[in-house]
Amino acid sequence: MLTPEDHRRIEAAVARAEDGTSGDIFCVLAGEVSSYREVPIAWGAIVSLLLPPAIMAVALRPLLAGITEGGWTVDQASATQSQIVFALTGYAIAQLILFGIVTLLASLASVRRVLTPRFLKRHRVKKAAFHHFAAAHSHVKDSDTGVLIFVALVERQVEILADGALHGRCGDLVWARAADAIKQGMKVPDPTAGIEAAIAICGEALKTHFPLTAPRDHLDRPVLDD
């Protein structure tokens, strides 16, 4: 996670980027956007449904081989029936135990983060970003030149959303460059530098297309943690 000094650097970068433009930049630094509660349950179900049948196939192979040889007696048929009942009971118990163990292990935060599919992380990050984008609009009246930089620090994903007027003039390339700057920054010891670079890129776009024509009448906003 980022330190208080990192937050001060980002706040200063936002102030510099907004200087000379009528647009607004919102920067949200989120920890983990979701608890992904369904992930441990899904992995528990997958393992408990797939592993016991494989074990059962191996365990019943000698029994099935004896059936194909023929020549059963009444005692053999009774013994075989008992073995089948025992195997099915063990199958059910194994499923329950495996489900519990795998679900419990997958509930550990470090394990769950590895097992969570990337597409699910991406979906949750997008959803959280849109939520914050809508919240930003509720605080800035009569403005359609805002841009939100949403950084999911745990998922290591970035979403940059811009209002229609700004996006219509800039297109996708600017936001892609800004997002890439953050992603590259996450690969080095100083990830804040990547966020600062992204803020500067967004600021240049705002200054180019929406330069300041009147004094700004809103207070500086702090970096938001989610």
Image (cartoon, helix red, strand yellow):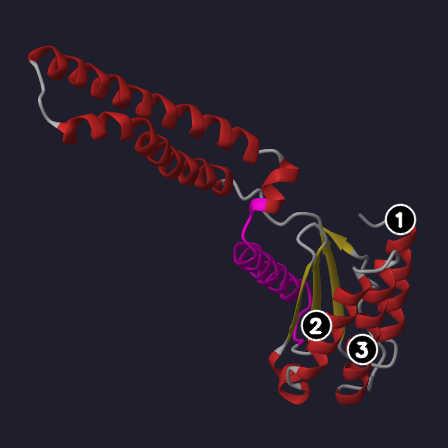
For the residues labelled 1 and 2, say whether their Cβ atoms are less than 8 Å apart.
Answer: no
Quickly name the residue at label 2. Answer: 147
| Mark pair 3, 1: CA separation | 23 Å
- Look at the picture and state if 155 lies above or below 211: above
Element assignment for label 1: helix
Residue placed most toward the observer, 103 or 169: 103
Q: Which of marks 1 and 2 is nearer the N terminus?
A: 1
Q: For residue 217, say whether it is visible.
A: no
Seen in the image, is 108 located left or right of residue 7?
left
The amino acid at mark 1 is Pro
Q: Which residue is drawn at 64% across and 66% down?
A: 137
Marks 3/2: CA distance? 11 Å
159 vs 99, left or right, is: right
Q: Nearer the viewer, mark 3 or mark 2?
A: 3
Distance (Cα) linking label 1 and label 2: 23 Å
Name the amino acid type tagged 2: Val
| Residue drawn at (70%, 74%) of the image | 146
Q: Where is residue 104 in the image (x, y as percent from the top left)?
A: 53, 29
Find the magenta span and give its range: 115-143
Between 181 and 208, the one lying in front of the other is 181
Q: Which amino acid type is marked by label 3?
A: Ile
Q: Residue at left 58%, top 62%?
A: 126
Badge 1 local density, few (<14 within 10 Å), some, or many (20+)? Answer: few
Q: Is residue 207 one of those drawn in magenta?
A: no
Which residue is under mark 3?
201
Looking at the image, residue 106 sits to the left or right of residue 210; the answer is left
